[in-house]
């Protein structure tokens, strides 16, 4: 090419959660059954939306209007429903004009970071959900800034480290939280959230809260959404239906803008995201159309409670089994359907190996070159047992060795 075609941030785009699938399929070709612990797709894991939700979708699909474009920000009635429900929860009050629909939160994440000025950075958790960390790093062409979630302290964020990093890097413009967290399952206590919002207030930052799992919080844990504690700090909350209905293939997510009137620059940024969406015309119509009817149905919250109770039982069982291994740190999740297992320092070394067939060993051998220690473990675990999971250090931008349990 006469000029370089590659974006400077291209090397920051990594998503090992999906990248390992190709390797797993090669192992599967040897006749090894694969246990998929990397997907995050409830449907692929055997769940089905209940019949009553599917009936609502069927009726909507029979309406010819479901095949039309929606208004660019989203269907008027759906945005009005979301704004009303949000306002009933208390905290910040919004209007339908503060809501913008996307084709899933992956689309929203790409837009949010892509719409930032190249010098404006967002600091996020470590371990990091790679869609956030990769998109943020790619937009800036530089490694992602992060604050540590501490496995020695139940995955609570290190707020002193967060503030030190914010203070040391004036280009940090925003703080990201994922609540409940992916991949640790940590649910942020209200006091922790308030302290993080206070850091944002004192350093004139905005907040992003990915709340895709906010209705999948376990009994005994209190979920506080960003809207309830943000005060006058500008912010963005992110929601969707992929995990709740569940309907990941519907590609339906939205963002909510808070306190646009409190900061002119933040308001201009929000308007730029809406302007960019106009170039795409709109997001998928059918899922938006059914959202109010499904979420307002009296069966919806009991249905979610039944699902989260099942996740909680599985999380407790996994914690019980894995806690018998002294070489790892594991905590019961507080929400979503993930856990993160951390190897204690010094447990892994480059002399360790698992027994596997010569054919499987040959498939993974090229991937072990220059791999991190927990990557070597996950590749060998896949080849030896068919369990497909993701290394913490490479898959989640983490500074500890471990793996994801889905």
Image (tube, rainbow, N blue to C red):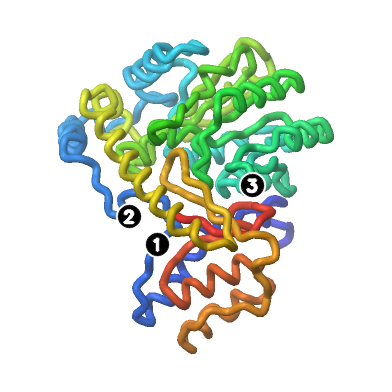
Please say if 118 is above or below 323: above
Spot the residue most to the bottom. Answer: 358
- The image's mark for residue 36 is 1
- At mark 3, the secondary structure is helix
Q: Nearer the viewer, residue 225 or 68?
A: 225
Please say if 355 is above or below 82: below
Q: CA distance from mark 2 to mark 1?
A: 8 Å
Contact, CB < 8 Å: mark 3 with mark 1?
no
Residue 34, horizontal then vertical, whole percent: 37, 69
Nearest to the eye among marks 3 and 2: give it: 3
Assign the N terminus to one quadrant of the image.
bottom right
183 sits to left or right of 55: right
Identify the residue at horizontal 26%, vertical 22% (top origin). Answer: 296
Contact, CB < 8 Å: mark 3 with mark 2?
no
Contact, CB < 8 Å: mark 2 with mark 1?
yes
Q: CA distance from mark 3 to mark 2?
A: 30 Å
User: Would you call the spot at circle 1 few (<14 residues within 10 Å), some (14-19), or many (20 or more)?
Assistant: some
27 sits to left or right of 58: right
Spot the residue most to the right. Answer: 168
Q: Quadrant of residue 196?
A: top right
Residue under pointer 3 = 152
Residue 282, horizontal then vertical, whole percent: 41, 31
Q: Quadrant of residue 364?
A: bottom right
Q: Is residue 401 shown to the viewer in this render?
A: yes
């Amino acid at each position: 090419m006469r000029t370089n075609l590659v974006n400077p941030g291209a090397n920051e785009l990594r998503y090992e959660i999906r990248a390992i699938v190709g390797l797993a399929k090669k192992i599967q070709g040897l006749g090894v059954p694969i246990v998929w612990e990397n997907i995050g797709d409830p449907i692929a894991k055997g769940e089905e939306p209940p019949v009553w939700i599917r009936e609502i979708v069927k009726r909507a699909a029979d309406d010819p209007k479901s095949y039309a474009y929606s208004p660019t920000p989203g269907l008027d009635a759906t945005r009005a429903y979301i704004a009303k429900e949000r306002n009933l929860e208390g905290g910040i009050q919004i209007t339908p004009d503060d809501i913008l629909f996307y084709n899933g939160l992956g689309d929203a994440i790409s837009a949010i970071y892509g719409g930032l000025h190249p010098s404006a950075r967002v600091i996020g958790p470590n371990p990091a959900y790679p869609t956030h960390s990769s998109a943020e790093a790619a937009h800036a062409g530089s490694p992602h800034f992060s604050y540590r979630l501490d496995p020695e302290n139940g995955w609570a964020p290190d707020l002193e480290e967060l503030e030190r990093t914010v203070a040391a890097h004036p280009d940090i413009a925003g703080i990201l939280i994922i609540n409940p967290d992916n991949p640790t399952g940590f649910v942020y206590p209200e006091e922790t959230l308030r302290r993080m919002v206070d850091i944002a207030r004192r350093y004139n930052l905005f907040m992003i809260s990915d709340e895709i799992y906010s209705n999948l919080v376990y009994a005994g844990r209190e979920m506080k959404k960003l809207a309830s504690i943000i005060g006058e700090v500008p912010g963005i909350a992110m929601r969707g239906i992929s995990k709740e209905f569940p309907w990941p293939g519907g590609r339906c997510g939205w963002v909510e803008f808070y306190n646009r009137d409190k900061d002119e620059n933040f308001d201009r940024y929000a308007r730029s995201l809406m302007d960019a969406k106009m170039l795409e015309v709109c997001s998928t119509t059918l899922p938006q159309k059914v959202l109010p009817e499904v979420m307002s149905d009296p069966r919806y919250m009991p249905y979610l409670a039944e699902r989260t109770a099942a996740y909680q039982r599985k999380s407790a069982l996994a914690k019980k089994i894995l806690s018998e291994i002294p070489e790892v740190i594991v905590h019961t999740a507080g929400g979503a359907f993930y856990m993160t297992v951390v190897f204690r320092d010094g447990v892994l070394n480059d002399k360790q190996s698992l027994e596997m067939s010569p054919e499987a060993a040959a498939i993974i051998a090229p991937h072990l070159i220059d791999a991190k220690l927990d990557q070597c473990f996950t590749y060998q675990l896949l080849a030896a047992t068919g369990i497909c999971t993701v290394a913490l250090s490479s898959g989640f931008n983490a500074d500890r060795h471990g793996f994801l349990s889905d």
